[in-house]
Image: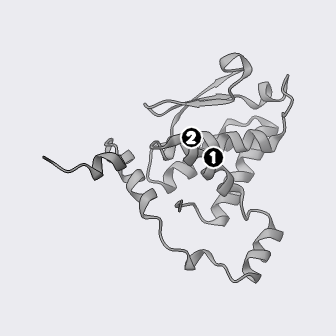
Amino acid sequence: MRMLLPPVRRRREIDRLLGEFFRTHEPRAFRRAIVQMARYYGLSAPRVTWFEYLDWGKTAGRTYENGDLHLVHPESWKRGRKYNSERRWIHMIYHEMGHYIFWANAEQKADVFASRMVRGLSRASGSRSRRAGKTASSAPRDRVGEVAVAARRTGRTAPSRAARRRRPR
């Protein structure tokens, strides 16, 4: 599945802001990161509500159809979790933003989005991809992601594959 992602420079900035928020709990850093992600896709920033825990501690974040995000605050994330690292929390934020941006087929696309947001961020991995001859400019544009973003902007959902295959009788 091809996916439209922000450039590496912007992803590094978003990652840095989320890490800063995790450490300092400065709301401005989190807001700037979320706004940068949403602005790239031409969406308004989601409404975020912070919680100590969700679903009896089983869930780290939840995205709703109306654009609300319910997230576990980093202060609560650090307490009582087996995997309470900063990277896990940031990955969870990317996952929930993936739900917000790519609402259709949400779970699979959110997982892919979260993993691709962190791919290539370290300086070492960027030099490896250049040696292999892969560049971001040579990759084809993501038509499927653009349709999903456009549908999200207009409030309409893109027709499902089954609906597109059906022929009028």
x 71%, y 59%: residue = 12
Please state if 88 lies on the left or on the right of 98 as rendered: right
Which residue lies under the disc numbered 2? Answer: 107
Q: Nearer the viewer, residue 108 or 154?
A: 108
x 71%, y 20%: residue = 53
The spot of residue 49 in percent (x, y) is 59, 26
x 73%, y 80%: residue = 130
Tell me whether the residue at label 1 lies in contact with that at label 2, contact meaning CB atoms closer than 8 angstroms.
yes
**Amino acid type, mark 2:** Glu
The spot of residue 125 in percent (x, y) is 79, 69
The spot of residue 19 in percent (x, y) is 77, 46
Kindly give the residue lying farthest to the top in the view shown: 56
Q: Is residue 84 above or below residue 98?
A: above
The mark found on residue 111 in the picture is: 1
How crowded pointer 1 is (Cα within 10 Å; few <14, some 14-19, many 20+) is rated as: some
Q: Nearer the viewer, residue 60 or 45?
A: 60
Q: Quadrant of the N terminus?
A: bottom right
Q: Is residue 80 above or below residue 95?
A: above
Q: Nearer the viewer, residue 43 or 54?
A: 54
Please state if 47 lies on the left or on the right of 136 as rendered: left
Q: Is residue 43 above or below residue 7?
A: above
